[in-house]
Image (cartoon, rainbow, N blue to C red):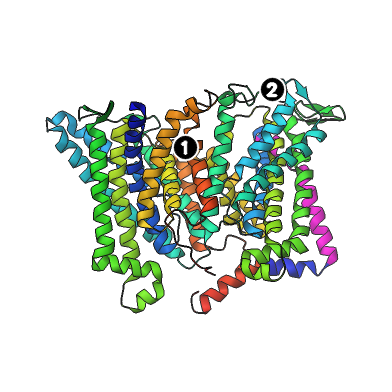
Amino acid sequence: MDIFIQQVINGLTLGAVYAVVALGYTMVYGIIQLINFAHGEVVMIGAMIAFSVIVALAPGGLPPLVVVLIATGCAIPVCMFLGYAMERVAYRPLRGAPRLAPLITAIGVSIILQHFAMMIWGRSPLPFPQVITTVGYDVGGATITNVQIVILVVSTAMMTALALMVYRTKFGAAMRATAQNPQIAGLMGIDTDRVIAATFVIGAGMAAVAGVMVANYYGIAHYTMGAPLGLKAFCAAVLGGIGNLPGAMLGGILLGVVEALGAGYIGDLTGNWFGSNYQDVFAFIVLILVLVFRPQGLLGERVGERA
Amino acid sequence: MIDEALARWKRHPAALAVGIALVAVALAVLPFALTANFGTTWVRITNFAILYIFLALGLNIVVGFAGLLDLGYIAFYAVGAYAYALLASPHFGLHLPFWAILPIGAAVAAIFGILLGAPTLKLRGDYLAIVTLGFGEIVRIFLNNLDQPVNITNGPRGIARIDPVRIDGVSFGVTDRLGGLVVTGPIKYYYLLLALVVVVIFINVRLQNSRIGRAWEAIREDEVAARAMGISTVHMKLLAFAMGACFGGIAGGMFAAIQTFISPESFVLVESVMVLAMVVLGGMGNIWGVILGALLLSFVPEILRFTVEPLQRQLFGRMLVEPEVIRMLIFGFALVLIMILRPGGLWPSAVRKRELAARDGAAPR
């Protein structure tokens, strides 16, 4: 039983990170129906910036928590700017173009960011400095660390703040209106270009925090870390119903837990025929099964055909 | 513009015949010219470019003709490659002849295509994209892990010492002398690939305007209307997946034979993305555009590989930035720039060009 609790805790932690990244995908998709393939790379850049800041500040004798906060505080604006620049340069000129064209520019941006990071931070994985000493707490025979608690709390806080913003503020209403119909929203006096840019910026800011969290959790930062994470997060967004905010949160958490439980139990279930190296297969099979039976995702609405 | 020029040219049969003859002669001489001027490496690069034409044309059937976004296309390439490798290598001790394996590889890949297509018929657009992406990853992860408990794929170590192609006692793996002419292995493969690709292009051209091709186009433009017109969307979609997969499988088999070594590392998501980029960049749905895209995206990175380093030395006297980085940065910027300047691709299909023109003039959507 304690293995079960342990895997659930690990899964929730990972799932929370997936959910935060997935929100970035889903917000952009909800508004302009674009799969922002470069979103995972923004997460990576966030982690890399934080890495450099922590390495620079670590010998200064500041309290560890302050160091991490400053690092995150540096990563967020950089990533936000990146999100804005990306939208402005690579996606805005292609609005109204065939659907696959922005997908290719997204791939281009992703290649650029990855190799830019490789140029600056090198090819080898960087050991992310563990400035905060990990402390474990006992929960029903399983262990939860302070890092995991922080990840859960920060993710929940960010998701709550985002939900409040989207559903309770005037700007949120503008976002939802743009998502429903950009033309009509424009006629109602909403500056849709600004709303779209802001969506990218918000998503990128959250991605930066996710990057710091995940690098801290695994203790590694690498220029290729963004792609697999982005892939999982994108799966999570689709699982929940892409374009749907609560769906992305649910999808992220679900994917994290399924993955952790799958990795923990697949060996026992199959008499050690399959090991935990099939962890990723598990996530994808769940995704495919869900989509076969609910093609619109868990919380997605069945939308009519759009020409 | 290109299309008009071609159309004008087609009205003069004599000029057309001369043009085709010139292209044929150029293609026939090409590998020897490359070997003489740049070395065998460039013949190999050309061979891979032709393999990418295979892949891009196969994916074009799924994405360009039928409008089904497939992000896991490389899985079929992998299936074809592993089918060849397992049937012609010491791994299982099997050494079937080339002409037997190629159809088997194509058939197995087609079956995988139907396996992927069947459960995803209901899915649309981006949902389909993510499921195909997942499918590609699943295939790769299985290839990576099926070395235990029963060793089928030899896991991450891959399969080595795959038999080179052998036809009528002529082995494609070794260098022969034909009179005064030195015919290396890659040159032999070049002719084989060229012959195969001509067949594939011919099939594609014939397919596009056939009943099937028009059915795909109808499904792509409006699935509901297509069904109303009596098109069996289920059959047509499965056919698109199967045919696309089939070409991927053949390309995979050739890849295994040329490389004589394969491992799961060759079949990662980036490769799927690359092939998709070739299709979209060249001009989705237009066979010649897709070929252009495949040639560009396979040659440009290689040309950059060979020019960036000497250029840096000449300009700065030393290596400032790794050539690999510059190569990929230029490549990334090129993707972005080309798509912004030509959203329909470099050489868009006639249908798409009309759509783009209509969208500029008329009210959006």
Q: Residues within 10 Å of mark 1 (few under 14, many from 20)?
A: some
Residue at point 72%, 32% (across, down): B84
Q: Residues within 10 Å of mark 2 (few under 14, many from 20)?
A: some
- Whether residue A293 is in magenta: the answer is no
Magenta segment range?
A: B13-38
Residue A134 appears anywhere in the view:
no
- Quarter holding the C terminus of chain A? bottom right
Of residues B164 and B17, the one drawn nearer to the viewer in this rendering: B164
Quickly name the residue at label 2: B161
- Whether residue B28 is in magenta: the answer is yes
Quickly name the residue at label 1: B323
Residue at point 53%, 52% (across, down): A293
Rendering coords of residue A54 (x, y %): 22, 34
Identify the chain of the residue marked 2, using the numbered disc in the image.
Answer: B
Rendering coords of residue A189 (x, y %): 30, 77
Label 2 to label 1: alpha-carbon separation: 31 Å
Q: Amino acid at mark 1?
A: Pro
Total of numbered circles in the picture?
2
Left or right of B337: which side holds A191?
Answer: left
Q: Amino acid at mark 2?
A: Arg
